[in-house]
Image (cartoon, rainbow, N blue to C red):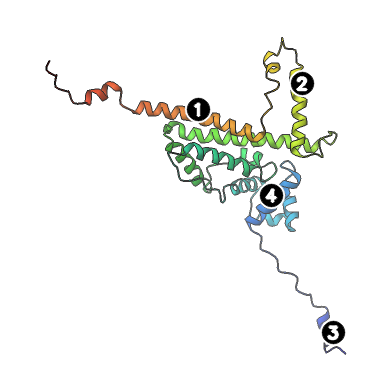
Amino acid sequence: MSDELPVLPWERSRRRPGPARIPLTRDRIVDAAYTVLDRVGHDKLSMRQVAAELGVAVSALYAHVSSKDELLELMYLRMFRDWNPPEPDPEHWREQVREYARTGRAKLHEHRDMARIAMAGFPFSAEALPHLDRLIGIFRAGALPDRLAGAAGDVISTFMNGFALEESMWESRRQESSDRAWDQESDEESWEKIKATLESYFRDLPPDRFPNLVALSGTLLEKSNDERFDLGIEIIIRGLASFAAENARTAAPPPEAASAEEPQKAPQKA
């Protein structure tokens, strides 16, 4: 026989306490927004879907986030969390720029369509300013003229975001094209088939009208996306380095001035 006593009649109707609710915060809302973004993409992301993901009413979100635009801004700023560019090093500034660009591209690929959000992001928010200041410091450490240091950061970010956006668009097309034979294959196999098709197309163009495309048909697409990205960054870095070298030459005293400062030697007797 059980020792447990029966429940008193007036206690049977009492509402049993439910599980404790986790407080709603901006961080939880952004986490849920990323989950929805990965599932449905940028165009279908909505406050209603984010609320459903959290199991709350849409009105509950607006106590923490004023609009979808602010939510997208918070998602963009989350990119900079735990991403700290290194202390500027004049001897290694080129390597630091390469690493910065590669890290940025990797962060853009952490979530679907993140590049689209980044393209509309506002880099002068309080959370992003220390990051931006450090990046400009790397360019200044490389002896880039001050008038170009800020522009260099914009060029790198624009290339990085644009490249990642192109990659995400191609990936979306590949996923949505269910009639293509390579849809169920690996990314590497898919790219090889797309590459072979495009190379054949360029090769078969009329050479009198498209001599350069025909001539380069076998090399236009020979590089992987990683190689293309690194090459693009290298082109930018070498261009910036030329400005740094020009700046150094301008800052150095002309040879005539340098020779004039040298002490005159006494004429030697014959």
Determine contact: label 1, label 3, CB under 8 Å. Answer: no
Q: Nearer the viewer, mark 3 or mark 2?
A: 2
Determine contact: label 1, label 4, CB under 8 Å. Answer: no
Asked which secondary structure carries label 3, the reply is: helix
Question: If you read the primary sequence from the N terminus, does the residue marked by circle 1 or circle 4 appear first?
Answer: 4
Determine contact: label 1, label 2, CB under 8 Å. Answer: no
Asked which secondary structure carries label 2, the reply is: helix
| Residue hosting label 3 | 9
| Residue type beneath disc 3 | Pro
Q: Position of residue 180 (x, y in %)?
A: 83, 33
Does residue 68 appear to the left or right of 176 in the view shown?
Answer: left
Res. 76 mark: none
Q: Disc 1 versus disc 2: distance between alpha carbons?
A: 33 Å
Q: Quick one: label 4, few (<14), some, or many (20+) residues within 10 Å?
A: many
| Residue type beneath disc 1 | Gly
Determine contact: label 3, label 2, CB under 8 Å. Answer: no
| Residue hosting label 2 | 201
Residue in view at x 50 percent, y 32 percent: 151
| Residue hosting label 4 | 34
| Residue type beneath disc 4 | Tyr
Q: Position of residue 159 (x, y in %)?
A: 59, 33
Q: Disc 2 versus disc 4: distance between alpha carbons?
A: 39 Å
Does residue 46 appear to the left or right of 90 in the view shown?
Answer: right
| Residue hosting label 1 | 239
| Residue type beneath disc 2 | Tyr
Q: Indicate whether 47 appears above or below 185.
A: below
Number of marks in the image?
A: 4
